[in-house]
Image (cartoon, rainbow, N blue to C red):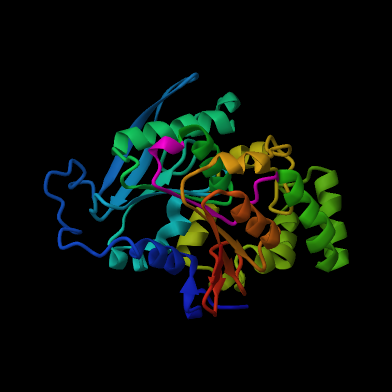
Amino acid sequence: MQHLYRGRFLLVMALAAAFAASAETPASYFDNAGRSDVLSGGVRMIPITTPKGNFRVWTKRVGSNPRIRVLLLHGGPGATHEYFEAFDSYFPGAGIEYYYYDQLGSAYSDQPTDTDLWTTERFVEEVEQVRQALQLGPENFHLVGHSWGGILAIEYALKYQQHLKGLVISNMVANIPAYNAYAHDVLMPKMDQGALAEILALEAKKDFANPRYEELLMQNYYVDHILRMAPDQWPDPVLRSFGKLNRELYTLMQGPSEMGASGRLVKWDRFADLARIKVPTLVIGARYDTMDPSYMELMAKQLPHGRYLYCQTGSPWPCTTTRRPTSTG
């Protein structure tokens, strides 16, 4: 297992380098004059309107740079912003103003229980309301979506790309049936077959709350294809994010595990629509991803202004590598 902090190039470093090409750390980066969020350390609870009522979502700004602002869309659905906290080690040095954000139903945001709220369409409208509240626009607004956040970023761009300056789709394919096929045809045959049989038996009985189920996934899948470290070495932000996962929301949309999707997203497919996204877009994949990295490279080629970043020894939480990532396109 690779140690996260021994890797010379992380996803966050790759993004920082990409953004730094168009931005230098301004002298005013830590100047909060005129900001309404000074006493809260950059935190704002943003009101959003939904068909099921009004709620609030949590955001936190770091830095000040009107030329380059990044909104981070976490995975799940139902995870939290916390596993992104490695950005604190790199983005300030690149002069990037960035925003952590817990989507509705996640950790520090409101957590309504009406399951009609959990649709990609409704989440897209939430992101747009957050964008408006944060006053992000086409002159500076970059959207980074990781895993489920990648689905949300694609959907947002297809409807609201006029507000974007750039887009990053990290560790996410544009076709859930392809995701499931890769897990079934490529990853599962490489697993310990006894453990796999036990996992599938528990899933068949819908015994997802059984501690043995999570234990088997951790030992036989997550440490290989989620975060390639021994579980007792997982960084604190990742553990906090996992610990606060909204499992009801996650299971409803994704399904009970990362070994493929079986929830509301199971038929989601936007590959043919990628050609409609005209903004510069970076697609990031990793060798040990839960999804096919070659498919992600194909996505970049489908995008009119797409580029592909490949983490040769990485996995998706986060994309880690001991070599310089290979960029194509």
Going by the picture, which residue comes out furthest to the left? 33
Residue 164 within the segment the image draws in magenta: yes
Going by the picture, which residue comes out furthest to the front? 304
Residue 110 at least partly seen: no
Q: Which residues are magenta?
A: 161-175
In the picture, which quadrant includes the N terminus?
bottom right
In the picture, which quadrant includes the C terminus?
bottom right
Report the residue at 44% width, 51% height from top: 81
Residue 53 at least partly seen: yes
| Residue 126 position by quadrant | top left
Residue 262 within the segment the image draws in magenta: no
Report the residue at 51% width, 74% height from top: 4
Q: Is residue 103 above or below residue 302?
A: above
Residue 286 image position (x, y, % from top left): 62, 66
| Residue 306 position by quadrant | bottom right
Asked if residue 311 lies left or right of residue 126, the reply is right
Mark count: 0
Asked if residue 144 lies left or right of residue 20, the reply is right
Looking at the image, which is closer to me, 280 or 315?
280
Q: Is residue 307 above or below residue 38?
A: below
Report the residue at 37% width, 61% height from top: 19
Looking at the image, which is closer to me, 36 or 232?
36
| Residue 287 position by quadrant | bottom right
Residue 218 image position (x, y, % from top left): 68, 63
Asked if residue 16 lies left or right of residue 179, the reply is left
Report the residue at 53% width, 46% height from top: 149
Residue 177 image position (x, y, % from top left): 76, 45
Looking at the image, which is closer to me, 40 or 93?
93
Residue 253 image position (x, y, % from top left): 65, 38
Asked if residue 207 lies left or right of residue 169, the reply is right
